[in-house]
């Protein structure tokens, strides 16, 4: 498997992200981002889009609901991206923000370059 990784941020974390995108790797991680501690399950952009869609109620009228529109747009962009493009974004699901109090949050998306540190394992999950 060819692993296209980012030139920004931690190279080991970039390899994990590439494996999540290309091979479906799912691993619990805790990230340190701008003074915030974020824990969750590493996931692909497509699975992240599915999680985002599920967080919004379905639309009962004509056209797409907001969740469906976001998911559709993200999936189309992911499908059209060059296969050798570096991964610059990390996606988490089952997210917990650590602080006072611990807060469960929606699926999370952030820049790899903004992650100042990380560890295996997700705090406050399970």
Image: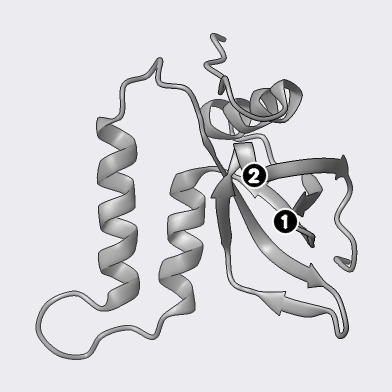
At x 66% / y 74%, what residue is drawn?
105
SS of the residue under disc 2: helix
Q: Earlier in the sequence, mark 1 or mark 2?
A: 1
- Quadrant of residue 107 within the rendered picture: bottom right
At x 67% / y 34%, what residue is drawn?
25
Give the number of the disc on residue 114.
2
| Front residue (pair 15, 34) | 34
Q: Residue furthest front?
A: 34
- Tell me the quarter of the image containing the C terminus: bottom right
Is 18 left or right of 100, judged from the image as shown?
left
The total number of labels drawn is 2
Q: Is residue 27 visible?
A: no
Cα separation between marks 1 and 2: 7 Å
Q: Are marks 1 and 2 in contact (CB under 8 Å)?
A: yes
Q: Residue 110, percent across and down?
A: 57, 51
At x 47% / y 22%, what residue is drawn?
86
- Quadrant of residue 56 within the rendered picture: bottom left
Give the number of the disc on residue 101.
none
Instruction: Kindly identify which residue carries mark 1.
Output: 34
């Amino acid at each position: 498997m060819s692993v296209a990784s980012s030139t920004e941020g931690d190279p080991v974390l970039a390899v994990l992200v590439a494996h999540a995108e290309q091979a479906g790797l799912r691993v619990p991680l805790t990230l340190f981002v701008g003074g915030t501690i974020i824990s969750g399950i590493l996931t692909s952009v497509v699975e992240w889009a599915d999680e985002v869609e599920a967080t919004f109620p379905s639309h009962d009228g004509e056209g797409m609901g907001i969740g469906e529109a976001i998911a559709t747009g993200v999936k189309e962009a992911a499908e059209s991206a060059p296969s050798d493009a570096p991964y610059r974004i990390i996606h988490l699901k089952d997210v917990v923000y650590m602080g006072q109090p611990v807060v469960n949050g929606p699926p999370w998306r952030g820049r790899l370059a903004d992650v100042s540190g990380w560890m295996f394992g997700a705090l406050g999950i399970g």
